[in-house]
Image (spheres, helix red, strand yellow):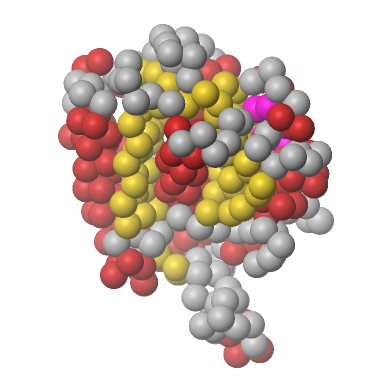
Amino acid sequence: MSERTAAMILGTGSEVSGRVLTNADLEKMVDTSDQWIRERTGIERRHILEEGKATSDLAAGAGLKAIEDAGLTPEDIDLIIIATITPDTSFPSTGCRVQTKIGADNAAAMDISAACSGFIYGLSLANAMIANGQVRYVLVAGAEVLSRITDWEDRGTCVLFGDGAGAAVLGPSDGKKGILSTYIKSDGKLGHLLELPGGGSLNPATEETVRQRLHYIKMEGGDIYKHAVRSMKEAAIEGLKRAHCKPEELDLLITHQANIRIIEALQARLKTPDEKVFINIQEYGNTSAASIPIAMDQARREGRLKDGHKCLLSAFGGGFTWGSALIQF
Ligand code: ACO
């Protein structure tokens, strides 16, 4: 363990809700096939949140489970960080909404916008704030309702995304477990390759922006694929280097679940054996900031991630943003 290890993960939780949308369902909506989606992405089904519910509902559900798993109560939480690109509203923040929903009355709350890398950004910030003594217990969640910004007439994107939330509670390290390294990076020059053009101060909602379908995700899939593999590899290697850890010392690799081919390409570059790579994209699709914490929680519940294990998280997303976190469980 590094002498500088300050924070550890005390508990995890995840929440998906609503109906399951299968590839067969999508075949009836756009010109696609179950075979194409499975072969190109690895996705078989995804969850679509029920109407009337929002990102804060999923984040609150995942957050309460993580707080319980940590053996804490909501009043113990000093800071709530919600990573999302689908906030309930521009403001108040989804973090503030989650605070109210879970009764974390003693916390400060905020959102982070770093797309699919948001949970790693949140972990990095929480780790630093615990390290400098500003806070003791932090709830970090990645939560998305991507179905609300998905163009259900665009087969190039609508087959990819799903809704869900995952969360972790961080607190001071016990000297055995802890966050061994974090690494975050961005390249704003490439932001136009993956964006939601409408609804902000640049293109506020008008009849014209709605007509032009600017309130849906726009994506250059091929370009993103190449950058995702390269950047997640860089993040993984840098994260290991910062903790003086060799790739073969890893017990589990959890990457952002964007596309099974991206995960397999990264796995091949890092030479990580199959049994050390966690994949659940078939069940949930790409849930952006939620994908890593959902996978981490599932891996713990299934016994793939146990006390004593070293786990590397690696993400890439819109912005572009990327990063990694190496965690000793
Ligand atoms: N069903 C059937 N055919 C389709 C579909 C679909 N859903 N979507 C596209 N096609 C067609 C295309 O029109 C194209 O047809 P053409 O050859 O007649 O022009 C053909 O399939 C091949 O299209 P490509 O875009 O070249 O397919 P590719 O193998 O690159 O796969 C994909 C596309 C899955 C989007 C891939 O590029 C990818 O995964 N990119 C990464 C993007 C990503 O994961 N984005 C998520 C957000 S970013 C993130 O989370 C990191």
Relative depth, front residue between 126 and 200: 126
Establish if 31 lies above or below 74. Answer: below
* Residue 313, magenta (yes or no): no
Quarter location, residue 75: top right
Q: Nearer the viewer, residue 127 or 254?
A: 127
Please state the horizontal and vertical placement of residue 59, each as a whole percent of the image: 67, 42
**Residue 162, horizontal then vertical, whole percent:** 57, 48
Locate the C terminus and report the quarter of the image it occupies: top left
Q: Is residue 313 visible?
A: yes
Magenta span includes 62: yes
Q: Quadrant of the N terminus?
A: top left
Prevailing secondary structure of the magenta residues: helix
Residue 210's x, y, as percent? 62, 82
Task: Write the residue at 57% across / 62% down.
Answer: 150
Instruction: Specify start and end residues of the magenta stretch as a single range.
Output: 61-67
For this orientation, the residue located farthest to the front is 133
How far across and down, in percent of the image, does residue 279 sit?
A: 43, 30
Vertical side of 208 occupied by 299: above or below: above
Instruction: State the count of labels.
Output: 0
Q: In this picture, is 320 found above or below 193?
A: above
Residue shown at 69%/65% (left/top)?
91
Q: Is residue 61 above or below residue 116?
A: above
Of residues 270 and 179, the one drawn nearer to the viewer in this rendering: 179
Horizontal relation, residue 41 to residue 294: left or right: left
320 sits to left or right of 79: left
Q: Is residue 74 left or right of residue 220?
A: right
- Residue nearest the viewer, comparing 178 with 219: 178
Residue drawn at x 56%, y 81% as measured from the top left: 201
Residue 59 in view of the camera: no
**Left or right, 299 with reference to 243:** right
